[in-house]
Image (cartoon, rainbow, N blue to C red):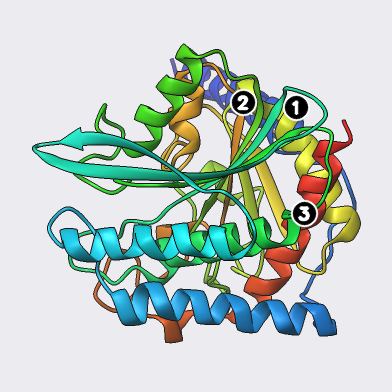
């Protein structure tokens, strides 16, 4: 009897180990040479840092909490984003829909390319109820605007589309009322050829403290660092080719550590942003994130304020993402 229990337990252990090994090989083993710590900023990255800080301060410090409960502030954020696109020389468009008698706006700015395929970069601009949302997701919006400014006036192979999404946070999260799902559905209906969707989600917090990084499962924790000094690239299994291409380009140019994983969508955290909406419509998408609640102690709280962000490393992430967009455009 004990012998049967022993060998039964051994078989289960071997099976679990085999599954984890396969998961690592196909979903976690990423191309490119990683680095162990952040490097110094260039003069251009110092200017980018100040730009990011100013936009986060505008969204989370001046406008403050912005959602359907704070509707005037939500619209003030929309106006700021639209004006920022226009000041960059782009031609923003509001993609609006009605939600319980109030109009909500996704805001897009497009740079036409030589080909019909679209590289779409997005970030949600609402904050969760009770929070000014500096990191979630003032950081993503600030990055979106900075990237749009850097590609404005440039030529590209793909059409580049920058979109700020409304109503990502609860109670609209992962529902039909989520701004990005409304938007992705309209893209699908008109036949938009989106070859890549990049969701910028809480990308401004880093820590060098031991055990500052946790994961939704011990299995993942066995493969990844326990120090939260890296930026994460996350996708579902279907989008793994896009993920691998993106992180390979990032690691070729970037000056900050990065980790990547293509995992089943149902693992906690994997689908927790606007890329989920595009997966639902059959488009490949990835999320760029500092892992939010698995690292950030002020997640979804009143303390998610502009002073909590690490703007040096934040700037390095955005600088690296500029190279990612350039690299994906060449494919």
**Residue found at x 54% / y 70%:** 204
x and y percent of residue 323 in the render?
82, 54
x and y percent of residue 29 in the render?
77, 38
* Residue 213 left/right relative to 36: left
- Identify the image quadrant of the C terminus: top right
- Whether residue 14 appears in this view of the structure is no
* Residue that mark 1 sits on: 241
Q: Earlier in the sequence, mark 2 or mark 3?
A: 3
Res 197 → quadrant: top right
Residue 153 image label:
3
> Looking at the picture, does residue 87 appear above or below residue 111?
below
Q: Earlier in the sequence, mark 1 or mark 3?
A: 3
Residue count near mark 1 (Cα–Cα under 10 Å), binned few <14, some 14–19, many ≥20:
few
Residue count near mark 2 (Cα–Cα under 10 Å), binned few <14, some 14–19, many ≥20:
many
- Identify the image quadrant of the N terminus: top left
Mark in the foreground, 2 or 1: 2
Res 78 → quadrant: bottom left
* Residue 324 left/right relative to 184: right
**Residue found at x 45% / y 34%:** 267
x and y percent of residue 190 in the render?
50, 14
- Whether residue 181 appears in this view of the structure is yes
* Residue 69 left/right relative to 258: left
Callouts 2 and 1 close, C-beta under 8 Å: yes
Q: Earlier in the sequence, mark 2 or mark 1?
A: 1
Residue 125 image label:
none
Count the marks.
3
Callouts 2 and 3 close, C-beta under 8 Å: no
SS at mark 2? loop
Residue 284 image label:
2
Tell which residue pokes out farthest to the left in this image.
101
Q: CA distance from mark 2 to mark 3?
A: 26 Å
**Residue found at x 72% / y 83%:** 47
């Amino acid at each position: 009897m004990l012998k049967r229990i022993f060998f039964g337990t051994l078989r289960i252990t071997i099976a679990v180990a085999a599954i984890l090994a396969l998961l690592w090989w196909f979903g976690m083993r990423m191309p490119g040479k990683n680095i162990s710590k952040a490097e110094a900023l260039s003069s251009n990255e110092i200017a980018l840092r100040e730009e990011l800080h100013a936009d986060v301060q505008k969204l989370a410090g001046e406008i403050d909490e912005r959602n359907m409960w704070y509707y005037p502030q939500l619209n003030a954020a929309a106006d700021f984003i639209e004006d920022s696109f226009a000041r960059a020389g782009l031609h923003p468009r509001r993609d609006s829909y009605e939600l319980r008698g109030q109009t909500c706006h996704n805001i897009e700015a497009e740079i036409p390319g030589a080909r019909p395929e679209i590289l779409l970069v997005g970030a949600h601009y609402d904050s969760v109820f009770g929070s000014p949302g500096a990191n979630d997701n003032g950081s993503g919006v600030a990055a979106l605007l900075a990237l749009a400014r850097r590609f404005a006036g440039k030529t590209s192979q793909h059409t580049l589309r920058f979109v700020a999404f409304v109503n990502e946070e609860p109670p609209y999260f992962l529902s039909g009322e989520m701004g990005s799902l409304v938007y992705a559905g309209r893209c699908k209906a008109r036949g938009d050829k989106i070859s890549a969707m990049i969701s910028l989600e809480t990308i401004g917090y880093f820590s060098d403290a031991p055990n500052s990084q946790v994961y939704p499962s011990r299995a993942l924790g066995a493969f990844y660092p326990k120090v939260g000094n890296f930026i994460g690239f996350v996708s579902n299994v279907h989008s793994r080719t896009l993920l691998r291409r993106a992180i390979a380009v990032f690691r070729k140019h970037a000056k900050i550590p990065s980790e990547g994983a293509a995992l089943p969508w149902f693992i906690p955290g994997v689908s927790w942003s606007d890329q989920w909406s595009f997966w639902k419509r059959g488009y490949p998408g990835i999320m760029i994130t500092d892992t939010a609640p698995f690292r950030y102690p002020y997640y979804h709280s009143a303390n998610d304020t502009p002073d909590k962000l690490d703007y040096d490393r934040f700037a390095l992430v955005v600088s690296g993402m500029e190279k990612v967009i350039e690299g994906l455009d060449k494919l």
